[in-house]
Amino acid sequence: MKPLLEVKELVKTYPAFRLGPVSFSVNAGSITGFIGRNGAGKTTTLKSILHIVHPDSGAVEYFGAPLSAGEKSIKQRIGYAGGAVDWYPRKKISDIVAVTKLFYENWDDAAYKKYLDVFSLNPEKTPRELSEGMKVKLNLALALSHRAELLILDEPTSGLDPVSREELLDIFKALRERGVAILFSTHITSDLDKCADHIVYIKKGELVAAASMASFLDSYASNGVRPGLEDIMIACEKEDFREKLAD
């Protein structure tokens, strides 16, 4: 089966940072966790594969076709949420959504109303009246309401309380059962322990691993005991830190 998203040798260079080359794929009906320290390049990668920023080289394919060949139609089939909503802080949520839905051919009002209820969002409020966690929920509600086949989410559980995070992970699992693919970055590795099928790990812009969760954990197992994701990340990053201290 062709992956819904395929990233090949992606490179993006800034004066003080270089990403890549990064390669990985995301399949239908799977949850892929994207991990790395703050500043490792997770957000740069996600924005590059969406052409929010333009990569220097590499290829990105959605549904078997290059993004450059049909960006408008492809983005009808994907959902993106990149943190809290800051646009139009004094406009009512209902007014923001009335405009947003015009951009999506498959906007589903019933799904939108369901997520308003699930996330306890009041459409008569404005973004400036929402907590940071509720802003994240609003952004997710918009991403989930146009029948996207692939969700690309940057730190979707950041700012949410533990109960809200559990509810969101339950939504992810339900979407996976319907064949939706989810790629989400997070530094809360315990969330991935509960739901991820695959892991992509980058460190200082370089790809460390892109593998199934099982094989990734097995590669760090000792005496038949698998460490957790958090333990693996701490060990990898501490090793790098110790090398710096020794220089």
Image (spheres, rainbow, N blue to C red):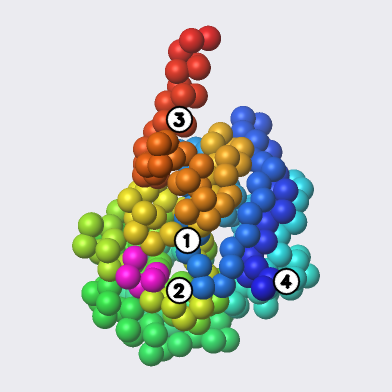
Q: Residue at x 45, y 30 (%)?
A: 237
Amino acid type indicated by mark 2: Arg
The label number, if any, that marks residue 176 in the structure image? 2
**Quarter residue 226 falls in:** top left
Label 4 secondary element: loop
Label 3 secondary element: helix
- Which stretch is magenta? 169-173
The label number, if any, that marks residue 237 in the structure image? 3
The CA distance from mark 2 to mark 3 is 31 Å
Q: Which residue is mark 1?
A: 197
Q: Residues within 10 Å of mark 2 (few under 14, many from 20)?
A: some
Depth check: give the residue in front, 29 or 8: 29
Verify whether residue 171 appears in magenta. yes
Q: Choose mark 3 or mark 1, whichever is in front.
A: 1
**Quarter residue 24 falls in:** bottom right
Q: Residue at x 50, y 67 (%)?
A: 30
Q: Residues within 10 Å of mark 1 (few under 14, many from 20)?
A: some
Label 1 secondary element: loop
First-in-chain label (2 vs 1)? 2
Amino acid type indicated by mark 3: Glu
First-in-chain label (4 vs 2)? 4
Q: Residue at x 75, y 56 (%)?
A: 59
The CA distance from mark 4 to mark 2 is 20 Å
Depth check: give the residue in front, 236 or 104: 236
Q: Choose mark 2 or mark 1, whichever is in front.
A: 1
Q: Which residue is mark 4?
A: 64
